[in-house]
Image (cartoon, grey):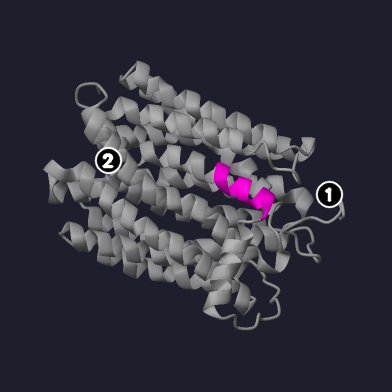
Amino acid sequence: MAHPEADAVGELPTATPPARGLLPLLFVANAAMYALYTGIGGVLLPLQIEHIDAASKVANLGIVGGVAAVFATVFNPVAGALSDRSGRRNPWILGGGLAAIAAMALLGSVHTVLLVAIGWCLGQAVMNIYQAALTSVVPDRIPRERRGIASAAVGLGLPIGSTIGVLVASVCSDHYRTGYLILGVLVAVAAVVFTTGSREVRQPPRPSTPLRAQAAAFLNVLREHDFRWAFTGRALLVLGYFSVTGYQLYILQDHISLPSGLEPARAVAILTPISAVAMAISTVVGGVASDRLNRRKPFVAAAATLAAVALMIPVFSPSWPAMIVFAAVNGLAFGCFMAVDTALVTMVLPKAEDAARDMGVLNIANAAPQIVGPFVASAVVSLGGYPPLFLVGGALSILGALAVAPIRSVR
């Protein structure tokens, strides 16, 4: 068997340095995606659900978030496999992006918890078609030695996009239908910009595969040792992260002592840029440093451990200053983790020709915790309040740090 460095797993044999402008386009496309996810998940969806039924907001948010994440889990690998079969990424990015406008228009116009759940399910479906194809651009078009800086460009989309999304959502907190539409339009515009600005070399179309064989392939990829551990580490940290951040608005409403006159939605809008700046710094530093040192695992493990430390801060001090510190430290941890872990996982893909499908399977590690997370979080909060929620999130982050240790093909 060739040494991992000699035969890069998950890299197309013809990979060449990325065309000029591809990294900025990846940043724009990812920033728009994260703007929608964060603006809706962090502000608009909790406000909409609270407006419908304030007394049951915690349980209802858990149900809506969990059910919608099932759609994300299903559509991501399926869309990835379809784009693999077609030999194209850009049409799927464009189609998912344009469909986001219709999905957001529907979501903003409904007035019952059931219809909100249906609307957000559709939103997750179209956004994961967009995301599955977009995620595959890095292993498709970026050579192995540039994965760190490429992942940093992708990772920068998270803090910048999150800030934009939360600011838009906060400004539109009294008119959330407008907020939904603006975020949908942002994704559509980004899809048009990316697909018109990035040239795509069409791969030979893949033959049709029976549904049973596709299901078997999804399961078989998890039997690959390194892929399985990368999947596990990502799933654990994301579960810890979203179990807490998904309830940030309610935490600020019900657990944190805010200064007089500071509304929770406004507090989210203040915390998000703080976290974004820290995230941007650690994303660039982590991505570049991991390239130069040719090491990924120490950065991923350290970031996951720091995330656990950050989650302890509000437990010991449920105050506004403590939340500011939490936002900064958590941003540092999550930015570094996402940048370097994204580079790491592209290196453990079993087959280059199945890159989109396998990245779609790996993205279940992003989506599946969002199925479990809302139910776990609502149960923990109902039983013990918000401090135990932070403790559970911290424990999951530590487990995520430990999970990268068994990976063999990446240092």
Question: Left or right: where does residue 105 sit relative to residue 142?
Answer: left
Badge 2 element: helix
Task: Provide the residue designation for mark 1.
Answer: 5
Residue toward you, 99 or 212:
212
Task: Provide the residue designation for mark 2.
Answer: 378
Q: Position of residue 77 (x, y in %)?
A: 52, 65
Which quarter of the figure is the N terminus placed in? bottom right
Residue toward you, 344 or 199:
344
When asked about the image quadrant of residue 408, the answer is top right
Residue 223 visible to an observer of this rendering: yes
Q: Position of residue 203 (x, y in %)?
A: 70, 76
The amino acid on which the numbered mark 2 sits, given as a three-letter code, is Ser
Residue at 23 percent of width and 59 percent of height:
116
Q: Would you say residue 356 sits in the magenta stretch?
A: no
Q: Residues within 10 Å of mark 1 (few under 14, many from 20)?
A: few
Region rendered in magenta: 224-233
Residue at 55 percent of width and 32 percent of height:
304
Q: Position of residue 177 (x, y in %)?
A: 24, 58
Q: Nearer the viewer, mark 1 or mark 2?
A: 2
When asked about the image quadrant of residue 316, the answer is top left
Q: Please report whichever mark, 1 or 2, sits nearer to the chain's N-terminal start.
A: 1
Give the tally of numbered discs: 2
Q: Would you say residue 229 sits in the magenta stretch?
A: yes
